[in-house]
Structure formats: C-alpha cells, structure tokens
C-alpha cells in the first residue's frame, strides 16, 4: 500500500512540473524570431486561421511561476506575419492569444499585421523593454492586463476599430505620456490606466458611458481631463491622487460621482457640478487642498443627495467661494465639512430654500464646523425674507447664521451649441438683471442654423435677461445632391452622408473607371457638396488571359443576386471558375457581374430549375456536376452560343469560389501559380525569372527578382492587375479586399 501511495504521489509531482505545450506548429517570423501557433476550429468564421500563442499552455493555477517559453522567448524588434505556411496550407494569423508574450522582457518593438482582430488578456504583460507597438485597424479587442507593467512603453495609438479595453490593460505603463480612446469604446474598466505616472493628457471617446474604479488612479502627471457628455458615471477613486490635475470639465450627462472619485487632486482650483448630477458620494473631492471655488450653477444640479459623514469637500482648506443655482432642490449634510475658510456663499433661490433646521455646530449642518459669522451670504434681489424671517416655517437656520447678507442683481446667461461640430455660439455672460445680451450662432461649413432652444429663430438675437438663463443653438446639416450617370445610386442627402454607388456595364462592355479618376466599383462617396460622377465603359476585353486567380470566400457567406447576372465568356479566354465547399454567395440588387472565363460547376453539383424555367445548352458551354454543391435558379437559365449566362432572379451557390486558370499552350510548362491572398498578389514557382506587376492599364507598379521562394506584391486596392513573368505572356489576377 505504501509503495502504491508513493507511486501516485510521484506521478502527481511529475504532472505538476511537466510543461504542457499549447501550440500545433511553430514558424520563423520575418524578423527572425520563432513563434508558435494553434489552428483555430474550422468553422465558417475561422476557416484556415490560427492564433499566435505561447509555447507553454497557460493555467491560472500556476500564474505566479508561469513563463510562456521553455527557452528562446521572442526578443528584439518583432514583425508578426499575416500568414504562415504549414503542412501545405497558408493560415491567416487572426488572434494574439492570452499570455502569448507574457514576461518576454527582451521585446523592444512589435508590429502586428492587419489580419489580427484581437489582442487577448496578458498578451504583452510585463514586457518591460517594449518601447513601441503598432496595432492595426482591424483590432477590436484589447484584453485585461494586455500591456500591464510595460514600463518603457512611451506611446501607443489605438485604432478606431477598438471597441473594448479590458481592465488594467495599461496599468503600470509608467512611461506612457498620452492616449486617445477611440469612439467605439463605451467603458473604461477598473484600473485601465492606473499608475501611468507619466500620462499628461488623455482624450476620451465620445461614446464612453462609465469610467471605472481606479481607472486613472495615481496618474500623477495628468493635468486636465474633459469628460464627454456621454459619460453618466465616474466610479470610486477613478482619479484618486491625480495631484497635477488642475482642470476638469465634467460634461453635461454625468449623473453619479463616486466615492473618492477625485480624492487628493491637490492642484484643482475650481469645479462646476453639471445640472445632470443626481449623486455625489462621500469624500468625492476630499483633500483637494487648492480648491477655491465650487459652483452648483443655475444651469447645473437639479438634485443633490450626498452620502456619508465626512463631507464631499472634506479638508478642502482653500475653498473660499461656493455657489448654488436655483435648480438645486436638495442639499444633504456635511457637504463642506471642515472647509474652514469658506468666506462667500452665493445662492440663487427666489421661491423656496432647501430646509435644514440645524444649528451651525450641529453635525447635520451642511456647513458643519465652519464659522459662518465670518462669511458672506449673497442672495437674489428681493428675496431677503426667505433667509432672515424667523417667523417663516420651516425656519432654514443655516442661512441665518451668516455674518453678512448681500443682495445681488447679477444673473447668468449660458449659451451652448447642440453640436460643436455643426456650429458654435457666443453670448455666455454674467449680467445685471434686465440687461440685454446679444446671442450669436455661427454654423460650420455644411451646416445651417435652425433656431434657439426656446424656438426663437433670430440670429443674431438680443435677449433681455430677467432670470438665470440657459439657451441652446440648434444646427442641422445642409442637404446636397449626388448625381450618378450610368450607375445606381445618387439622390439628395445630408452633408457628410456616405453613399454607395454601382456602375452597371451592359452586355459586351466593361467598366473602366469614374469621371473623377476613381476606379473602385462599387464605391462610397462622402457627400460634402453637390457632386456629379459618370461611370465610363469600353467594349469588353477579349484578349488572351493566362492567369491563375483565386478568390477565397468564407464558409456560409451569403450572396443573393436579385436581378440579372451576365457571365460573359470571350472566345480566347482560358480561365476556369470552380465552385466548391458548401458556401452561399450573395450579391445585391441590380449588380451585373462579368466573368471572362468558362464556368465549370463540378463534382456532382445539383442544378435545380423551377416551374416554367428553361435551360438551353449550346456550343462551347459546359456544366459538370460535383458532390454536395447546389445551384438553384428560380427563373430562366440561358446558356447561349456566345457563352453568356443570364440569371433573371436568384442564385444560391453553396460553396467557396475559386477562380483559377490553365494558361495557354506552352505556359503551363512553367508550372507557376499566381493568386491573390489578403490583399496581396502571390507568385510561386517563377523559377528565377524577373516578375513585374502592372495595373489593368499597363502601368508598371512594382518589379521583383524571383529567388525561388514565394514572391508577394501588396495590391494598392481591389481590382484587376497583370503579372508578367520573364518573357512569358502576362497573366491577369483579381484582388478583392
């Protein structure tokens, strides 16, 4: 029995220390480092993709002792490839996995390819030497602790595609000086930038709703912050101990300021609480020792319950001036506890005063511990009875203990724009009751002034100030007309609208470009003025084509062709279209597709023609059936002697599309493959020949010498290109992004 127990313990000890490898294969990166990959499940979204992963399997149980590599972890300047070749297949690098480069302290810089869409948790955690990283536009997720303690990372650009930042993603990045949060991000999670002690500026995206717990804790160099109007909540200790923070704009949508949210912001000199705020938690501005002015303006707070016993502005020893707007209906105890130097309190209540039946020294007093006999209370003209009449029930005692009461006839006029991108306004001022204020609305290009928020349409406008006033200038976009000739699209739209247009070639014609020298079709136009564009067509090209072009579509992608599709096959074209692997291909209304090659539907495909449909199969047309593929034609299929297919309704093709080619006689002997992949043109087997890339008009774009390895050209855009290999005839290749 003892021997059995000993054996079991030995096995468990071996299992605890044995390295569990996480990868399916490894490959050398273009920059020379060995990287490890696991193949993603072969689903419709992950087809032929891989995740860049650590060499050793990560487990939370062993996190403190975990290292992702047994030896030779990546270091130096790393360039991650977009594709890797393994076992006869090219795989696209789609994810950077959890802990992929954790503790890779020798990494200096990293370039991430455009194929990557997610950087997962702890991916670059504790890469202490990392100084720069390039994140491409397709990345939408940056996980928890992704760059935790990358203490030498001084700058990073987050692309607009990012929609999610995990908690502590940049915690401890002590060299980071600035950051811009994309508009797609809706929440700053806990500790995201905690301890970024060199961070001096940050721009928050316009759609952030919440700033989380300790989000900017101890960001001691941060000097100013503008909270977008979208933010409703600033949580506990979000800006705790930001000792250089001197300017804060809280926006107009904030409802909750959490416990100790701005605790210890000792450089802050003034703060205005917006009207939208309904809750300020205990000690929110505790120890803001330079704070001299606090304003709850007339256009600010409408309800202000304060929680706790230590006071929202506790130990703000420099606080001298406090203002309450007439929209503040509730004030709780101890707001200004031990703010001993308050000398002036301005109030704007003209009808009723928040009630507190409490003595000056009472712990329920909003001015607890403050010698009000040395302070001045400034009240609106004609309202002195509200603050001094001892026969008034209830008796608002705190206001009666001020040593000096002054009446003030000044009023606030606050003027805003509904959207600063559309236009700006002027006229904000402090004026004497009954004075005139001139308000002006100035629209930006592409917009026009509509009215003021009280429905007055005068611009400029003279306003007689009879009370504290908030007014908003309303702007709207201008409308412009897009006129399209020989194309679908166009119409009248608001300024900056994005309109997609389609060129429609007729039979035996092909699209050559637009009148403004853009060749993309379809294309998107951003409308900034009245615009006219014309699609230009020429007779279809029937020259020899000797190419091998591959279009890789993902499994189960849906393509619906809702009108007419022409597959036009010129006499001298040697390309072949293959339809394979159970995908559905979808196109949109009124799109004419010209494919200049013979069409083969192979491996026992099923061709289904419904009631009243006609199939005419004449000279030079071929249909071979392949397994499991289905072509359903719900109208009329005509295969004519000119190799033209007209589909007058809907086509469902359940597979990936490969467009490949055979070449003319004598060219196949070269055994060269030319195809497109992820926006690149790839040439394999050029046998040492000089290879030249042309655009469809014959202009040279690039040239390379084959070195008996796959050659890659970066295509500038989607479209048709020509590849010439040595003295052999040129080949056509189509690139679709």
Image (tube, rainbow, N blue to C red):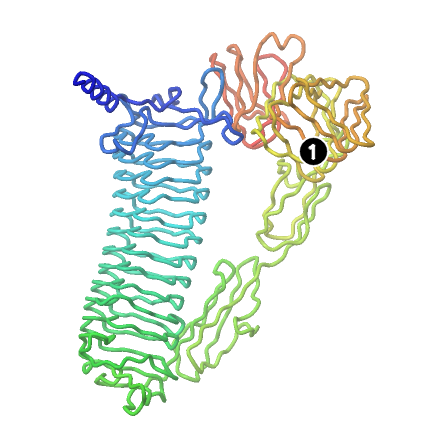
- Closer-to-camera residue (84/175): 84
Count of labels in the image: 1
**Image location (x, y in percent) of residue 420:** 47, 60
Residue beneath the point at 70% across and 45% down: 484
Residue 146: quadrant of the picture = top left
Residue beneath the point at 57% across and 73% down: 457
Which residue in the rendered view is the most extreme toward the front?
A: 1
Residue 644: quadrant of the picture = top right
**Image location (x, y in percent) of residue 519:** 63, 35
Q: Secondary structure at mark 1?
A: strand
**Is residue 137 shown above or below 32?**
below
Left or right of 154, for residue 734: right
- Closer-to-camera residue (388/316): 388
Left or right of 639, for residue 314: left
Residue picked out by circle 1: 511
- Closer-to-camera residue (363/50): 363
Which residue in the rendered view is the most extreme toward the bottom?
A: 391
**Image location (x, y in percent) of residue 284:** 27, 62
Residue 260: quadrant of the picture = bottom left
**Is residue 480 shown above or below 363?**
above
**Is residue 414 shown above or below 96?**
below
Left or right of 171, for residue 705: right
- On-image quarter of the N terminus: top left
Left or right of 731, for residue 328: left
Task: Sort mark 1 into few (<14), some (14-19) or many (20+) by Cα contacts within 10 Å.
Answer: some
- Closer-to-camera residue (644/616): 616
- On-image quarter of the C terminus: top right
**Is residue 592 shown above or below 308?**
above
**Image location (x, y in percent) of residue 466:** 44, 83
């Amino acid at each position: 029995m003892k021997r059995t127990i000993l054996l079991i313990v030995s096995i468990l000890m071996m299992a605890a220390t044995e390295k569990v490898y996480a990868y399916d294969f490894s490959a050398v990166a273009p920059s020379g480092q060995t990287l490890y990959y696991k193949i993603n499940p072969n689903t419709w979204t992950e087809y032929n993709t891989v995740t860049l992963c650590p060499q050793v399997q990560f487990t939370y149980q062993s996190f403190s002792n975990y290292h992702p590599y047994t030896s030779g972890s990546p270091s130096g300047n790393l360039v991650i490839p977009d594709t890797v070749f393994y076992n006869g297949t090219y795989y696209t690098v789609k994810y950077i996995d959890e802990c992929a480069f954790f503790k890779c302290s020798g990494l200096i810089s990293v370039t991430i390819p455009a194929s990557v869409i997610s950087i997962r948790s702890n991916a670059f955690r504790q890469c202490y030497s990392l100084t720069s990283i390039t994140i491409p536009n397709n990345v939408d997720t940056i996980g928890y602790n992704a760059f935790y303690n990358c203490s030498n990372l001084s700058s990073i650009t987050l692309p607009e595609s990012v929609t999610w930042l995990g908690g502590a993603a940049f915690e401890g990045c002590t060299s980071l000086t600035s950051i811009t949060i994309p508009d797609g991000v809706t929440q700053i999670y806990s500790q995201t930038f905690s301890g970024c002690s060199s961070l001096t500026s940050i721009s928050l995206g316009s759609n952030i709703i919440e700033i989380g717990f300790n989000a900017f804790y101890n960001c001691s160099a941060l000097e100013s912050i503008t909270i977008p109007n979208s933010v409703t909540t600033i949580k506990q200790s979000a800006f705790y101990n930001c000792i250089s923070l001197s300017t804060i704009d809280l926006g107009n949508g904030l409802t909750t300021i959490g416990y100790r949210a701005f605790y210890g912001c000792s450089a802050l000199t003034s703060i205005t609480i917006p009207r939208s705020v309904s809750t300020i938690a205990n000690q929110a501005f505790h120890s803001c020792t330079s704070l001299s002015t606090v304003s709850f303006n007339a256009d600010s707070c409408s309800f202000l319950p304060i929680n706790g016993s230590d006071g929202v502005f506790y130990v703000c020893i420099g606080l001298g001036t406090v203002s309450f707007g007439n929209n503040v209906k509730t004030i709780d105890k101890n707001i200004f506890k031990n703010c001993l130097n308050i000398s002036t309190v301005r109030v704007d209540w003209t009808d009723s005063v928040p009630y507190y039946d409490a003595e000056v020294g009472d712990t329920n007093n909003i001015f607890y511990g403050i010698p009000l006999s040395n302070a001045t209370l400034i009240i609106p003209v004609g309202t002195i009875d509200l603050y001094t009449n001892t026969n008034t029930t209830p008796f608002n005692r705190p206001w009666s203990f001020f040593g000096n009461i002054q009446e003030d006839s000044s009023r606030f006029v606050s003027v805003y724009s509904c959207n600063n991108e559309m236009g700006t306004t002027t006229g904000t001022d402090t004026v004497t009751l009954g004075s005139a204020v001139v308000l002006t609305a100035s629209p930006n290009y592409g917009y026009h002034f509509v009215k003021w928020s009280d429905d007055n349409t005068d611009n400029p406008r003279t306003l007689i100030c009879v009370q504290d006033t908030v007014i908003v200038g309303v702007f709207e976009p201008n409308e412009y007309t897009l006129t399209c000739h020989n194309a679908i699209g166009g119409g009248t739209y608001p300024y900056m609208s994005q309109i997609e247009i389609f060129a429609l070639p007729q039979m035996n014609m092909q699209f050559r470009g637009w009148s403004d020298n853009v060749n993309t079709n379809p294309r998107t136009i951003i409308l900034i003025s009245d615009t006219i564009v014309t699609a230009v067509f020429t007779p279809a090209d029937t020259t020899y084509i000797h190419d091998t072009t591959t279009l890789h579509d993902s499994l189960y992608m849906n393509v619906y062709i809702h009108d007419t599709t022409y597959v036009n096959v010129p006499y001298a074209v040697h390309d072949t279209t293959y339809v394979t692997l159970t995908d559905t291909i979808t196109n949109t209304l009124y799109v004419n597709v010209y494919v200049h090659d013979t069409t083969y539907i192979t491996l026992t495909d099923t061709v289904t023609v419904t009631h009243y449909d006609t199939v005419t199969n004449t000279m030079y047309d071929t249909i071979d059936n392949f397994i499991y593929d289905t072509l359903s034609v719900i109208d009329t299929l005509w295969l004519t002697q000119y190799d033209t297919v007209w589909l007058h309704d809907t086509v469902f093709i359940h597979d990936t599309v490969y467009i490949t080619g055979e070449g003319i006689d004598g060219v196949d002997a070269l055994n060269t493959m030319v195809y497109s992949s992820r926006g690149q043109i790839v040439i394999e087997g050029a046998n040492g020949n000089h290879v030249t890339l042309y655009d469809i008009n014959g202009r040279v774009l690039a040239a390379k010498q084959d070195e008996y390895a796959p050659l890659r050209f970066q295509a500038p855009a989607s479209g048709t290109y020509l590849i010439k290999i040595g003295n052999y005839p040129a080949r056509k290749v189509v690139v679709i992004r």
